[in-house]
Amino acid sequence: MKVIHVIPSFFPEYVAGTEVYCWTLCKHLQRYGITTEVLIPGYGQQETTDYEYDGIRVTKYAEPTKQTRLHIAGLALPDGISNFKEYLVKSKPDCIHIHGIYPGIGITVQHIEEAKSLGIRVIYTMHLSGHICATQTLIHNGIEPCDGVIRPVRCATCNLIHRGNNKVLSRALAGISDAFQKTGIDSGYWNNRLGTALSSVNRITDLKANLDRLGLLCDKVVVLAKWFREIMAKNNFPVERMEYVPPAISYLDEPVRPLPSLQFNHKDSIKLIF
């Protein structure tokens, strides 16, 4: 069996939680004899290249696109998608495991569509909340916890506030954006700051549309928290497509050893900061 993990970036060029998770999963799959590779965009590259990291083959498919505001808004697709598909045709994986979709010229929902057109099974682990929250904070107006239900005008207002606009202006911009969206106007194509602000409702509408597309395209979507699974269900994501997998994989090569008991000679309360 061959599994290709698709991620916007990977070791050693970029190190964060998603990369650690992906690397760990690759090492565990290798222990079970599963052929495991990583595929990432080769930003600015005209040719596809590859290298090895910790026994894992990493391929950077050519992604020569110069990112614009239209790419970030999701109104233009990166040119490298054809190179992405070409690599999958040559590699012939049984499954690809996606570890993140982000605005711009990285991995998009269209990449998943291209993989499905080849008959490849797709697993997607949602590491962040960006598919339901444009700010990725789930904090409404920067003040209180949000229920996570996508509501275009409400979410657009919140996102505008998150980007530094005051509440009155944000509500006004979201109101105009809502009127534009209902009349079929997408000012995001103006390709300037005003157009971006006035297309805020369009972008939230796209957010929900892409979430629905993922529900149709992905064979399974892995969520890392039960509360996030509940929010996904509130947004009408197919429950049967979701799998809750707690993020508790050991990344050590040697067997996990029992922790020694902790003893403190301290009369007062102890604060542990992680």
Image (tube, rainbow, N blue to C red):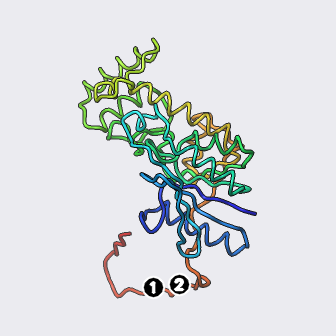
Q: Label 1, on which residue?
A: 262
120 or 129, which is in the foreground?
Answer: 120
Of all residues, the one furthest to the top in this rendering is 183
Image quarter (top left, top right, bottom left or bottom right) of the C terminus:
bottom left
Question: Given the image, on which type of amino acid does mark 2 rest?
Answer: Leu
Please state the horizontal and vertical placement of residue 142, each as a whole percent of the image: 32, 40
Left or right of 22? Residue 1 is: right
| Residue drawn at (68%, 37%) of the image | 216
| Residue drawn at (71%, 46%) of the image | 219
Spatial CA span between label 2 and label 1: 9 Å
Query: Tag 1, which secondary structure?
Result: loop
* 10 Å crowding of disc 2: few (<14), some (14-19), many (20+): few
From what the image shows, is residue 199 above or below residue 207?
above
Between disc 2 and disc 1, the foreground one is 2
247 or 147, which is in the foreground?
Answer: 247
117 or 205, which is in the foreground?
Answer: 117
The quadrant holding residue 215 is top right
| Residue drawn at (58%, 81%) of the image | 253
The quadrant holding residue 163 is top left
Query: Tag 2, which secondary structure?
Result: loop
Please state the horizontal and vertical placement of residue 98, each as a whole percent of the image: 59, 52
Q: Label 2, on which residue?
A: 259
Please state the horizontal and vertical placement of residue 242, each as a whole percent of the image: 66, 47
Pointer 2 and pointer 1: residues touching (CB < 8 Å)? yes
